[in-house]
Amino acid sequence: MVDLIPRRNSPSPGLLGQRKPLGVVGGMGSLATAKFLEVLARKSRVERDQDHIPFVCLSAPNIPDRSQAILIGSDAPLRQILERAYWLEKAGCGAIAIPCNTAHLWATEIKQALSAQLIDMVEITRQVVEDSRGSEARTLRSISLGTSASMQHGLYAGLNNNNFGKQFSRSLTELQHEAVRIITDVKSGNVIDAQDKLTRLVHAARSFDPDKIILACSELSAICGDLADDNDIVDPINILADACIDWWTAGSHAFGHVGQAIMG
């Protein structure tokens, strides 16, 4: 009987193709990772299986909570994120995507540690939102909703204008607490309740008349549904998928130029 199963220590060139695939550090959380991969497939708009972006996704979810670690000054999640990114580099990936907003509080350290390109979801989202105001000189008013760490440490600080009045300052803590409750519901599988709560949270945020509301946690992106189609909603998962498609379309060597065009 002929043994048809290749027995090699590393992937064959035929398996990965002629170009380096995308690497995805997943598991933060699992539903959010699945959402990103679904969006990536839907946005690719290709006619054949063979034309989709090849990727290697490592979804090993045993990474400590990113928000809790940042709030206590621990970098334990960073070490584990880098372990997974290194594994993807060794698997032959040419660029790394991390569909987790809070993890990007370590974006500088991750970029310095990797040889492959980090497709920086937060940096690109910032630029996309900033560009959305067009030629208007006014300051863009945005509210980001996410984990405690991302909201307290200003993950999207370059976009936020806290000049919403005293009522907003008094309400900010409650907005943060409600966002965290929704994220916890999603991670525990309580998606239906979480979707209803997110709709109410977005309504509360809209009462302050922001230009944009940023879903600054991928769990919120995973359940946002039709909210993502509203003009005032910014979904970084959608933006990350677009950037990954741009990277693949342009070729890994050209991404630096594409990224500069996107990010200014």
Image: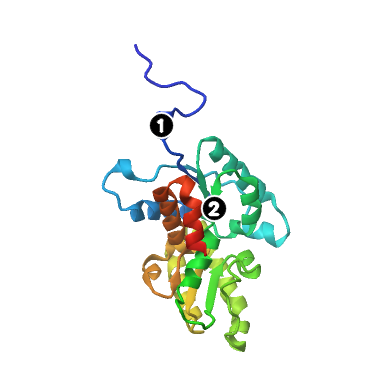
Residue sitting at x 42%, y 57%: 242
Q: Nearer the viewer, residue 41 or 71?
A: 41
For residue 219, say whether it is visible: no
**What is the quadrant of the N terminus in the image?**
top left
Please tell me whether mark 1 sits on a helix, a strand or a loop: helix
Q: Quadrant of residue 235?
A: bottom left
Give the distance between the C-alpha atoms of the residues marked 2 and 1, in whole angstroms: 27 Å
Packing grade of label 1 (10 A; few <14, some 14-19, many >=20) is few
Residue sitting at x 60%, y 78%: 172
Which comes sooner in the sequence, label 2 or label 1?
1
Residue at mark 1 = 15
Q: Can you say whether 79 is above or below 231 in the image?
A: above
User: From the viewer's perspective, is 264 left or right of 36?
Assistant: right
Residue sitting at x 27%, y 44%: 48
Q: Amino acid at mark 1?
A: Leu
Query: Residue 163: horizontal and vertical position, in percent?
Result: 60, 84
What number is the disc on residue 69?
none
Query: Residue 147: horizontal and vertical position, in percent?
Result: 59, 65
Q: Nearer the viewer, residue 151 or 92?
A: 92
Residue at mark 2 = 28
Query: Residue 151: horizontal and vertical position, in percent?
Result: 61, 69
For residue 149, say whether it is visible: yes
Q: Can you say whether 204 is above or below 113 in the image?
A: below
Q: Furthest-top residue in view?
A: 1
Q: Furthest-right residue in view?
A: 73
Q: Can you say whether 58 is above or below 223 in the image?
A: above
Residue sitting at x 47%, y 29%: 11
